[in-house]
Image (cartoon, rainbow, N blue to C red):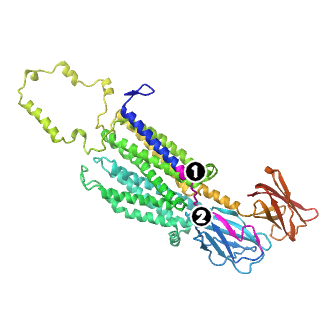
Amino acid sequence: MTNDRMGRSVPKVQRAGLRRLSRRTLVVGLLALLALGFGASPAQAHATLEGTDPPRGSIVDTAPSVVTMNFSERVVPVDGRIKVVAPDGKNVAEGEPTTVNNGARLRIPLKKDLGDGTYLVSYRVISADGHPISGGYTFSIRVPSALGAKAGDLSAGAESASVDSGVRAVQSVSRYAAYAGVALLAGPLVILLGLWPRRLATSGPRRLAWTGWGLLVGGTIGTLVLQQPYADGGTLADISVSGIGGTLDETVGRALLARLGLLVAAIPVLIRVLRPAASADGDDPGWAGPVDRALVGVLGVAVLVTFPFAGHAGQSPAPLISVPAITLHVGAMAVWLGGLAVLARYLLPRARYRELEVILPVWSRWAFWAIGALVFSGLIETFLEIGGFGGLDRLVNTVYGQLVLTKVIWLGAIMVVAANARAWIRRRFGMPVAYALAAEEPSKAPATKAAKAKAKAPEAKAAKAPETKAAKAPETKAAKAAKAPATKAGKKRAPEPETADFSAAGRAADEIRRLRTRVSIEVLLGAVVLALATALVQVAPARSADDAAEAAANLPYSAQVNAGPNVLQIDLSPARIGTNELHLTAFDQNGLPVKVEEWGGSAELPSGNVSTDVVALPLTENHAVGQVDLPLVGDWKFTFTLRTSDIDQYSVTRTITIR
């Protein structure tokens, strides 16, 4: 025995337990550092537009026969959402768009003999991870003109597309149901196969497991059915059999269909494993044998693998890392939260002291490793999705990163409660116990042959011995005092019986109720974390958001701005250091050319204290062209002036980023 800092004695067993806890904490820390190293690998999840032909904002001399868009990964065009709008407002795309280069290049055939003016390319495609992205850009043939349609959300890169609020809400519920279902199915299976006392009926955990199976099936079907209107931008009324068939041609649809097939195939195994005991005392030799356990494990892992392929991780450039990480992440979550639900709902209210003496230390160890796996795999996936150490700022600057930080805060709250519960278990059940659950109470357990023989000998001698006078004598006062009821003080010092039923009143019952409260809080906090995980699946990863911004920055600058009662179109290409070509075109609000008497302009870089004049020579009455030499990168402030009469002159200022 030694003393701790508060002067209390600490048994050697507890000190050994502290050393084991320290070693395990060190292991989890090393795994976390390993995750940081893996996180240095690049990752993508949403496709981004990397280039176009004709280039965005360009003015070409010859009408193109096809428009080409190059994406960072495979995309699927959405029917009816790929358009090329001419200056007169008509769609000049001809035929269906096609994809080449393994789906990463989108080709849009155009009609022949296109007229002069500015054309708007509008698109909506489905990324490989099942999320829709949309955007648009312009190019001009010979002479710029006013747009023939509302530009709307013109974006150089690829952005998350708008989704109907009803579709998004129902799909969110479906994804949440799938996560909750896998937890409620895995938790009872793990507890029943590994820690459930054989004397207790299994009806409660069995109902919970089948409820989890139903939620998982329902959530998967809901996600599959809603994938097409989610991607197309439709409503709940647009759900169709053909739409579901189209979804099955995508990676997400195939993963969801595989999950449904596995869940149906698991029904016979679950019926066998979750069936009630064949006899009243639970002694059924065929219950959950090695083959059953192996089948449950194989099917369980197969179901878990479908989760990364139905989300971001399946499309990562490092699938050998991201797919196992998400599989482990979902599996650890399911075992931990599902096991806690069974513990709070069934075991703590019904198990006896002797049973909990075995169950709780074992469960505490399992929960510790489940949390370690959860943290380790979460670190891997987070660092993959933010782009490694170079993307740490994306944890604050992107919606994805902010959701991750919020999830970490809630998970930290769960771990605080879990640590408190684990400390209670170690104090209460610090002594090591055999890993075995008795089917009967210890007092009623059958004796061994050696014990029976040893007990039989003195009994026989006592039976043959004649009664002495002392045996017939009345009980003494001391003997009566020994049989007297214990005092109040004695009751306080007496330990709880090994077979105490915690449904009865007493100190042990109060402690178990407090432990059950802690576990219930863990489950409720876990429900919030599941909601955050659902939101993360439906948000563009941080790296993808930056990839879209970077793609936009690598394309030429093009914009239309108001200049008094007129509209000025500005095209600057390639918007990089060195010589840039500038086009200025003026229209009225109806899109008709406005005659400009004189053009002028300037450009300055305030941070570099550099400025230069912008000279634009007229080509037509409303179109001028010039060249601008920009020696430094940065945010340049451009001012353009157009004089339309002797007294009417207008100026506009725009900030353009030069790389």
Q: How many neighbours does mark 2 have within 10 angstroms: few (below 14), some (14-19), or many (20 or more)?
A: many
Q: Position of residue 10 (x, y in %)?
A: 39, 29
Left or right: where does residue 584 sit relative to residue 419?
right
Local secondary structure at mark 1: helix
The residue closer to the viewer here, 80 or 372, is 372
Residue 554 appearing in the image:
yes
Q: Position of residue 609 (x, y in %)?
A: 82, 50
Please, what is the three-letter code of the amino acid marked with disc 2? Pro
- On the image, which quarter does residue 421 sit in? top left
| Extreme residue toward the top, this view | 477
Q: Is residue 537 above or below residue 107?
A: above
The residue closer to the viewer here, 576 or 300, is 576
Q: CA distance from mark 2 to mark 1?
A: 20 Å
The residue closer to the viewer here, 96 or 181, is 96
Q: Which residues are magenta?
A: 35-60
Q: Residue 650 got which mark?
A: none
Image quadrant in which the N terminus is located:
top left
Q: Is residue 185 above or below residue 419?
A: below
Local secondary structure at mark 2: strand
Q: Is residue 449 above or below residue 44?
A: above
Residue 532 appearing in the image:
no
Query: Who's the residue at 81% across and 61% down the image?
Result: 562
Residue to which mark 2 is pinned: 132
Residue to which mark 1 is pinned: 403
